[in-house]
Image (tube, rainbow, N blue to C red):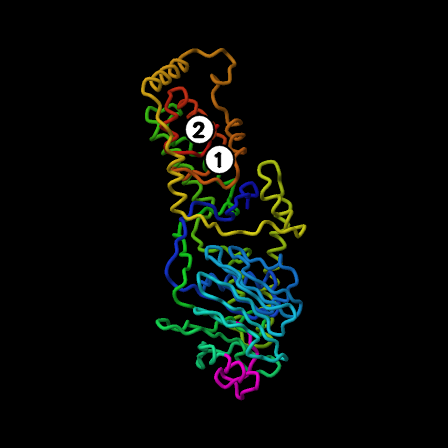
């Protein structure tokens, strides 16, 4: 690993991606009683969301009293109820439009919060086992609405051996409000008690009926580490979900082999044409091919849909062993190994991030790290209410420069051509050729993570290339400048601007 390649905002993978679109499909909703939400559990939730295409998280028993700790990458906190003993949190993907409708009072025995996501009301509910359920505990919302959470009510309709008064009240409330129960007796129970060695289903979901709508689908996933509850996956119809971007390959600069890359690029100069070639475009193409050929051998390049921090093949192996292990000692041991490994990797990544704080180039990443260290939260992300159709005409308008008069344009070009032909005084900076030191200084002044041009050459490729290749490139730029062909070169590249 080469630390000099780090510093990209898209690290470890960097590259161009395609824009996200929206499809008229229902996004999957992941419901889970976490029994205490931690950073390691958040990583597991991210992995589950990636596999099951979940865009909304409905979590109960977060046991969190600080809202700043309720953070999941690429998701916005739609609403939360802070509590040391219970607590709720609803996360919505940043590409979906949402708004917080209402939530329960602080002293309410039945906690709930309602978030409107693309026109559908999603109500996150948690009722403690010892509290009672009353018909007025949860307000009713118009169709379409979805009530999801841990109700802790016993009823024959959802798999219990008996019906308690609280379960009867919940069933009557759902019937009177025209709500359908999302329950399949053939599915696995959502809760497995280690004390009684019995599986039950306190985690429930109710959906409102419509004239021309069908009930959402609901399934139960596998075990979750350090929680007796199993995640539930709900797919409501007719909601907009962000479509995944095209699988574009990206470079993993974090795992780049700098020494080997420098050797390969330095030895490729022998296969390049002279620095003042007759065909500039062909010479530039050969230069780019030599850089890309060395990069393919020294820098991993692959596709990844979503990035989960510190989750690698070792974590995936431990997670599979945990899901396959029977409930008991083996399952607890696998869960402890998985969470311990995630904690170790995050601690190492955090030390690396703190040691790499640097204000010389860009202070944005440094201040973001300092804010995390001090506990200060940044600005909350807000949805942009300006449509893309109104932005596009403005971009076209900004790019439409006025064309000057032909006479003045010809006069300016003639004066510029005569100026290049005038011999410059000795020692003047304009007459001096480019040198590798100037090239490196120009590249270092650029912000890390800049997108490449049409030639797909990152500035880091040239910055970490061999000295012989840098010298050839400087002579090549000098030749282009003196032959006044730099404009033709700019059409195919924007790797650097020395």
Q: Which residue is mark 2?
A: 473
| Residue at 43% from the left image edge and 37% from the top image edge | 291
Viewer-proximal residue among 91 and 358: 91
- Residue 334 visible? The answer is no
Q: Which residue is mark 1?
A: 465
126 left or right, relative to 393: right
Residue 273 in the magenta stretch? The answer is no
Q: Position of residue 470 (x, y in %)?
A: 47, 30
- Mark 2: secondary structure: helix
Viewer-proximal residue among 132 and 253: 132
| Residue at 51% from the left image edge and 18% from the top image edge | 429
Q: How many marks?
A: 2
* Cβ atoms under marks 1 and 2 closer than 8 Å: yes
Residue 153 in the magenta stretch? The answer is yes
110 left or right, relative to 283: right
Q: Position of residue 15 (x, y in %)?
A: 45, 45
User: Which residue range is magenta in the image?
Assistant: 149-173
Tell me the CA gap for discs 1 and 2: 10 Å
Q: Position of residue 19 (x, y in %)?
A: 40, 49
Is 134 placed above or below 316 here?
Answer: below
Quick one: label 1 or label 2, which is nearer the N terminus?
1
Is 195 placed above or below 409 here?
Answer: below
Is 260 placed above or below 330 here?
Answer: above
Is 349 placed above or below 181 here?
Answer: above
Viewer-proximal residue among 487 and 271: 487
């Amino acid at each position: 690993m080469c630390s000099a390649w780090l510093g990209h905002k898209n690290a470890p993978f960097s590259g161009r991606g395609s824009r996200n679109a929206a499809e008229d499909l229902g996004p999957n909703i992941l419901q889970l009683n976490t029994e205490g939400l931690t950073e390691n559990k958040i990583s597991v939730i991210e992995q589950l969301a990636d596999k099951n295409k979940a865009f909304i998280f409905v979590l109960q028993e977060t046991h969190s009293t600080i809202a700043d700790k309720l953070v999941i990458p690429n998701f916005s906190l739609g609403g939360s109820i802070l509590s040391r003993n219970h607590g709720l949190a609803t996360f919505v993907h940043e590409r979906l439009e949402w708004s917080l409708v209402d939530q329960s009072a602080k002293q309410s025995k039945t906690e709930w919060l309602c978030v409107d996501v693309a026109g559908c009301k999603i109500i996150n509910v948690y009722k403690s086992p010892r509290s009672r359920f009353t018909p007025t505990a949860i307000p009713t919302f118009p169709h379409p609405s979805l009530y999801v959470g841990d109700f802790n009510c016993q009823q024959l309709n959802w798999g219990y051996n008996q019906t308690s008064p609280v379960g009867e009240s919940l069933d009557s409330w759902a019937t009177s409000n025209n709500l359908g129960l999302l329950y399949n007796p053939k599915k696995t129970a959502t809760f497995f008690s280690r004390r009684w060695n019995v599986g039950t289903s306190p985690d429930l979901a109710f959906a409102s009926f419509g004239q021309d709508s069908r009930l959402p689908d609901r399934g139960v996933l596998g075990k979750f580490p350090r929680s007796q509850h199993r995640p539930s996956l709900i797919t409501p119809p007719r909601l907009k979900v962000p479509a995944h971007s095209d699988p574009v390959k990206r470079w993993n600069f974090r795992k780049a082999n700098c020494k080997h890359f420098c050797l390969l690029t330095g030895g490729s100069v022998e296969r390049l044409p002279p620095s003042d070639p007759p065909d500039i475009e062909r010479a530039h193409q050969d230069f780019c091919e030599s850089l890309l050929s060395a990069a393919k051998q020294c820098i991993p390049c692959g596709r990844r849909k979503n990035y989960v921090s510190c989750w690698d093949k070792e974590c995936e192996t431990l997670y599979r062993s945990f899901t396959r292990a029977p409930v008991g000692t083996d399952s607890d041991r696998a869960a402890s190994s998985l969470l311990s490994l995630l904690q170790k990797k995050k601690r190492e990544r955090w030390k690396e991030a703190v040691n790499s704080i640097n204000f010389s180039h860009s202070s944005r990443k440094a201040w973001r790290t300092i804010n995390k260290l001090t506990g200060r939260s940044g600005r909350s992300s807000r949805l942009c209410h300006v449509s893309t159709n109104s932005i596009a005409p403005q971009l076209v308008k900004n790019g439409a420069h006025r064309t000057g008069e032909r006479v003045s344009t010809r006069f300016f070009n003639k004066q510029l051509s005569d100026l290049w032909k005038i011999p410059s005084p000795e020692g003047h900076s304009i007459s001096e050729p480019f040198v590798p030191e100037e090239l490196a200084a120009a590249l270092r002044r650029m912000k890390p993570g800049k997108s490449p041009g049409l030639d797909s050459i990152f500035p880091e490729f040239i910055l970490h290339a061999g000295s012989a290749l840098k010298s050839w490139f400087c002579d090549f730029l000098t030749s282009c400048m003196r032959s006044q062909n730099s404009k033709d070169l700019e059409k195919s590249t924007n790797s650097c601007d020395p």
